[in-house]
Amino acid sequence: SQQGEEDPQALSIQEGENATMNCSYKTSINNLQWYRQNSGRGLVHLILIRSNEREKHSGRLRVTLDTSKKSSSLLITASRAADTASYFCATRTENAGNMLTFGGGTRLMVKP
Amino acid sequence: GAVVSQHPSRVICKSGTSVKIECRSLDFQATTMFWYRQFPKQSLMLMATSNEGSKATYEQGVEKDKFLINHASLTLSTLTVTSAHPEDSSFYICSARTANGEQYFGPGTRLTVT
């Protein structure tokens, strides 16, 4: 079953704008990960944030985690057309045998 | 980084036939492998978890007799879709986890049943 809900489900922006995607989850987690998936392709791991961390950066990516609200956000700054993809959050929960459980995903389209 | 391969990347089969998909961890030993299914424009849904040398654990609603999983070695797991039907057409993704908990994903296999 899915643990995370992502918001929005679809997002369309112009190149150069920032894109923000949100993920909410239901149970306590060990860590939360963000993945990218180009259409019909496999998953690419973007960033992992642990439950005791609040913010992480990687290049143009910024991830925040608010465990009190059970939510995370992924910000892509200065978006490019090549950022067009689906983005998924996934939580790792000790109670679920340390399995990764994926959210519904956000389909991002960046228009040139 | 660690690499997980899947074979084939695409397969088309006729209704009623069986299809085997292989998942290999190329440069590490995977204590646990996972099989996911993904319908178009949807998220990944975990089908089953397998540990080397033991029976797979299937998620609720996944028929174990239809989706046969064999994890014969620490680098190979196979998923066999038996008596495939058009509704089994989907994108199947495997994932392998190392002993220290890092998880790596394969590129996926697109199955089309005609």
Image (tube, rainbow, N blue to C red):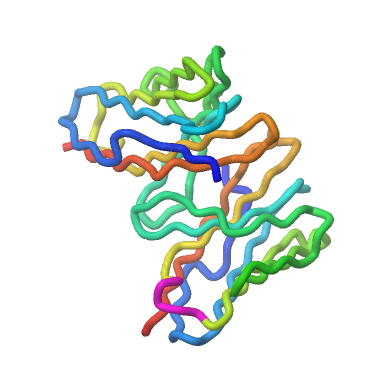
Of the pair B93 and B61, the residue shown nearer to us: B93
* Quarter that holds the C terminus of chain A: bottom left
Q: Tell me the residue at 41%/46% (across/down).
A: B38
Q: Position of residue A111 (x, y in %)?
A: 38, 82
| Residue under the image location 19 percent in, 37 percent down | B12
Q: Which residues are magenta?
A: A79-83
Residue B25 shown in magenta: no
Answer with left or right where residue B104 lies relative to residue A71. left
In the visual, does B114 lie left or right of A53?
Answer: left
Considering depth in this image, is A41 or A72 the residue closer to the camera? Answer: A41
Q: Is residue A88 above or below residue B1?
A: below
Judge by depth and name the residue closer to the eye, A90 or A61. Answer: A61
User: What residue lies at 67% left-to-right and 36% top-to-bottom?
Assistant: B101
How many marks the image carries: the answer is 0
Name the dominant secondary structure of the magenta segment. helix
Residue B102's x, y, as percent? Answer: 64, 40
Q: Position of residue B29 (x, y in %)?
A: 56, 26
In the rendered image, the quadrant that contains the N terminus of chain A is: top right
Residue B7 in the image: x percent, y percent?
A: 32, 33
Point 54% across, 41% down: residue:
B2
Would you say residue A81 sits in the magenta stretch? yes
Q: Does residue B55 appear to the left or right of A32 in the view shown?
A: left
